Image (cartoon, rainbow, N blue to C red):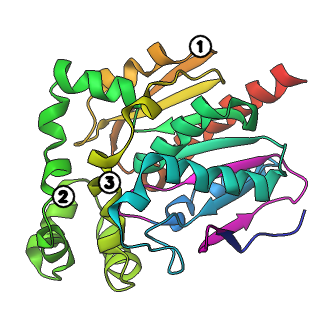
Amino acid sequence: MAELTTLTRDGLVFDVLDEGPRDGEVVVLLHGFPERSTSWRFVAPLLNAAGYRTVAMDQRGYSRGARPRRRRDYRGSELMADVLALVDAAAGPTGKAHVVGHDWGAVPAWLLAAHHPDRVASLTAVSVPHPQAFLTAMLRSGQLLKSWYMLAFQLPRLPELVLSRTGDIAARQLRSAGFTADDVARFRSEIVADGALPTALNWYRALPLGDPRLMRRRVSVPTTMVWSDQDVALARWGAEHAGDWVDAPFRFVPLEGVSHWIPTQAPEALAEAILDRVDHAQAAAS
């Protein structure tokens, strides 16, 4: 199949990194906030070496050609439709892909697996659990306190002002969340300097506009949940109980001593978890 460099959907043009053997099974890699598809730069080669084709997309709000301004354009239904279009383009209109999502990227991954299980061979969610497990965790595990920034990001202009500053304050905030110096530099070049910050924040600002019913669907595809114990944003309870919403083989993989930024800080462990899941799914399907 031909290499993808862009994906067009509903007038938006998304940038795509398509790597690995052309005849390999497709693994879709979905980044979170505030990163782009380059966050998979250490994981993708490991999956490619194992024979899998990886397709990583700069999602809406990040790709230069896909930055609608309205909050409503970032509802879960739109995010899911973007990923479905990517699966269509990479695996064919009736094909399946293994879907991996980190941070915010896990949300459309969960939604696609729940609403289009015929298009998802397996799911690996990284850091963020099933939406309903996350909501339940808000009341049971101190997740509400860890999610304070989600409320702060609803404010107009102030988050952009704080995060786009090049001084020590912004750097300290990002470093306290687990970013390395290289991560901070990449954030400043790929997100702030490239103009993606305001529209990337729309993923948070669209939360009040979404349909709650979309988030309640159970998942019926083989699923792995990867979580790290140094994550300042996600408590263990939600990740551990993500399997409560999965009616298929489920595995919880906790990583010790790793921050929230698993794809760049523990790529080998994450690749191992992904390969374990996709290999088992492939064997079960054969």
**Relative to 259, is 215 on the left or the right?**
right
**Relative to 158, is 131 on the left or the right?**
right
Q: Identify the image quadrant of residue 164.
A: bottom left
Q: Residues within 10 Å of mark 2 (few under 14, many from 20)?
A: some
Q: Which of the two labelled residues, at mark 2 and mark 3, occupies the earlier sequence position?
A: 2
**Residue positioned 69% across, 56% down in the render:** 85
Q: Which of the two labelled residues, at mark 3 and mark 1, occupies the earlier sequence position?
A: 3
Whether residue 66 is situated above or below residue 148 in the rendered picture: below
**Residue positioned 17% across, 57% down in the render:** 154
* Quadrant location of the N terminus in the rendered image: bottom right
- Does 41 appear in magenta? no
Q: Residues within 10 Å of mark 1 (few under 14, many from 20)?
A: few
Whether residue 69 is situated above or below residue 20 in the rendered picture: below
Q: Which residue is mark 3?
A: 206
Query: How far, Cα to Cα, is label 2 from label 1?
Result: 34 Å
Q: Which residue is mark 1?
A: 247
**Furthest residue toward bottom:** 193
Q: Amino acid at mark 1?
A: Asp
Given this view, does label 2 or label 3 mark the residue nearer the observer? Answer: 3
Decide if residue 130 is in sight here. Answer: no
* Quadrant location of the C terminus in the rendered image: top right
**Relative to 18, is 91 on the left or the right?**
right
Q: Amino acid at mark 2?
A: Phe
Q: Which of the two labelled residues, at mark 2 and mark 1, occupies the earlier sequence position?
A: 2
Q: Which residue is mark 2?
A: 153
Decide if residue 89 is in sight here. Answer: yes
- Marks 1 and 2: in contact by CB < 8 Å? no
